[in-house]
Image (cartoon, grey):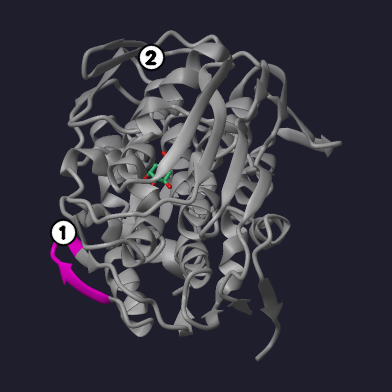
Amino acid sequence: MKLIVEPAKAPLTGHCRVPGDKSISHRLAMLGGMADGESLITGYLDSADTRATLAAMAALGAEISESDGEIRIRGGRLRAPAGPLDLGNSGTGVRLLAGALAGHPDLHGSEIRLIGDASLSRRPMGRIVEPLREMGARIEDHAGCLPLTLRPGPLIGIRFRPRVASAQVKSAVLLAGLFARGETVVIEPGPSRDHTERLLPAFGVDIRRQDAEIHLPGGQRLHAGRFHVPGDLSSAAFALAAGLLVPGSRVVLDGVGLNPSRDGVLRILAGMGGQVEVQPGEMVGSEPVGSLTALHSNLSGLEIPPDWVPLAIDEFPVIMALAAAAQGATVISGAEELRVKESDRLAVMCRELARLGVRVEETADGAVVHGGPVRGGAVDSHCDHRIAMSLAVLGLVAESEVVIDNAEWIRTSYPGFVDDFRALGALMRWEEGV
Ligand code: S3P
């Protein structure tokens, strides 16, 4: 489906409650499905990715019901699913689930296949398969990719230092460690989002951090609880960017997760001269939450410090879109991980920005984006939700209409994106089947 974005004729104004955090939703579905008792979750993200994880947990025997925006999950006893578990487009879904199931005691002796869509089937799985095998997991991949075939059995704890600062890799090993014999230690090469470490204690799990080391004793059981999922800062980033770009705008985002391991985007926006007021609120469970207000700003280019990259890893498409409309050059380096996301986000953003007349240079581990006038025209999402939404934001300040092909992939993480943007005053419409 095509999404047509018209240049904004008026400021964007108003409040927006962004959808629930994708990372936290996936984790709650899995942990709730494995925990003894009934967990109650509000604010769960209703999107294709997070529905796939719920469906996988249901196929594994968790009892899941939904009403009035609340999800109830009765877990505690898993069984082998009747067929393959399809995690769709979700790297978090498949990598964390592989870890959680690799040694799960209820599943010993069974065989489980994990599959996904074309994009997920191209993404590297060696990064989780290798440490899980070191723990004793019997797991087969297909040339380092999906499908994965698991034969759950006994695991032993390991000391593991991932090569990349990746929350998915760290979390896969920690979730496997829950059911291993002995202690699992993950030594982080650099900070990455810490939702798993924050959530596990709420399920009664003993887990401790000592500087860069995370220690998790094995042989643990999880206990159900009540949880609220805060708004996703990665989804909020689109409305923040739009508020900064469109003259006269003032956009307020309420109930957004402000976990410091995710706040790289706020640092980068501030570094570009973007005025984003942060109003910290109360903790929601183990996560800090607050309100953000974006005011139209004159943005300038920024040399982004490479150590900020993992803290803003999902926001680079929209940061590149902002950079295209800023004054001067934005330099991104140390960001080769962007090449193994839902698409090769460095290559795809460079190609699509160039189609809108933006001067960009792609480098091995980043890009240089030169700000300047942005033409209208036809672009493509490359089946990547964040590319589609980033190009839509840039379309608001293009010289003429921007038409984004394959924009329906937005449903992966933010099905209400177009409605939310329209409510703020943006002119966007779907054009079907053209
Ligand atoms: C996620 C971790 C990040 C991020 C992804 C969600 C998570 O991936 O890109 O969208 O929920 O753990 P990496 O950990 O592989 O960088």
Quadrant in the picture for the C terminus: bottom right
Image region (quadrant) for ligand 1 = top left
Q: Which label is found at residue 218?
A: 2
Q: Residue 304 placed where, x, y %?
A: 20, 47
Mark 1 residue type:
Asp
Mark 2 residue type:
Gly
Q: Residue 25 placed where, x, y %?
A: 59, 36
Q: Quadrant of residue 359?
A: bottom left
Between 303 and 22, the residue placed more toward the observer is 303
Is residue 365 a member of the stretch shown in magenta? yes
Q: Secondary structure at mark 2?
A: loop
> Which residue, as the protein is rendered here, is positioned at the far front?
248
Main secondary-structure element of the magenta-colored stretch? strand
Q: Residue 353 placed where, x, y %?
A: 35, 75
- Residue 98, placed above or below residue 229: below
Q: Residues within 10 Å of mark 2 (few under 14, many from 20)?
A: many
207 relative to 256 in the view: left or right: left
Segment colored magenta: 359-367
